[in-house]
Amino acid sequence: MNKLMNITDAVKLIQNGDTLGIGGNVLHRAPMALIRETLRQNKKDLKAVKTAGAMDVDMLCFGECLKSVDAGFISYETEFSLADHYRRAVQGGKVKANEHACYTVMSALRAAIYGIPFMPVKGLIISDLIEANDYFVKITDPFSGEPITVVKAIAPDVTIIHVQEADVQGNALIYGPKFDDVLMAKASKKIIVSAEKIVETSKFLAAGQKVDIPGFLVCAVVHAPGGAAPCSCQEYYDIDRDHIKEFKALKDQDQLKGYLDMQKTKDYR
């Protein structure tokens, strides 16, 4: 089945209020073209899920798309400093930050994969996070009688992931670190994949070549060269530091709209 779509139609699969899983890690292989299109379509009340985010979550907060964020870490790296739009949205009460450790996000996703309501998280015995995050509850282990913390399952309605190669059926290949993308894909109800390159399905039929995300899980494939930029995409391009600094200098919604308009040529090709 051919699942190749343009970016506009693919992002229409995301509904207001959805729990949105976001692939990549910090400034590496984040699905930025899909993020920008989410802003252009003015999606609202999304609940973002990411182990370690940066520009993707920051941009969604700037565009007033988010209701909450479940994440272990949201910040830019090195010289780029804090995610200012995320910080202001949380401090201003516009976005609820459900702070995790990165591994508790992964545990919540694993619970969804296994079809169970929660997952024990042994390392989280004493922490302010237990009281601050509604996804954590301390219960009694029925076998030992000792207290143990559990995290509620998280099953994203839609997950957006950028990969290096995919075919029209949705089979996707990731070069380099896979981060938590495969885990998030398995936990999700729908997956939208953007890819640097669309390849023939025969590539995945060759001996020894296995897909990272199988096509039967994927709802839409978008051909998006540069789809992670200005973040990096291994074997294709590095972080565009000047671009990130220009984005971080934007101050208001008019400037954001101008920025999104300028990116249309790249995102819509």
Image (cartoon, rainbow, N blue to C red):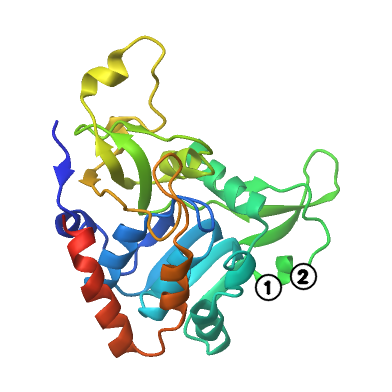
Element on which disc 2 rests: loop
Q: Along the line of sight, which residue is nearer the eye, 110 or 170?
A: 170
Q: Which residue is drawn at 68% across and 57% down?
A: 101
Residue 174 seen: yes
Q: In this view, does 247 lie above or below 224?
A: below
Residue 117: where, in percent of width, then height?
A: 55, 48
Q: Which of 81 and 66 is in front in this view?
A: 81
- The answer to whether mark 1 and mark 2 are in CB contact below 8 A is yes
Q: Which residue is drawn at 53% across and 38% down?
A: 177
Q: Quadrant of residue 187?
A: top left
| Viewport quadrant of the C terminus | bottom left
- The label shown at residue 128 is 2
Quarter of the image where the N terminus is located: top left
Q: Is residue 62 above or below residue 244?
A: below
Residue at x 66%, y 61% (from the top left corner)? 136
Q: Which of 221 and 233 is in front in this view?
A: 233
Q: Is residue 113 left or right of 206 when viewed as pictured?
A: right
Identified by mark 1, the residue type is Ala
Q: Which residue lies furthest to the top in this view?
A: 207
Q: Is residue 67 visible?
A: no
Residue located 80% across and 38% down the image: 143
Residue 28, horizontal then vertical, whole percent: 49, 52
The tag on residue 132 is 1
Amino acid carrying label 2: it is: Asp
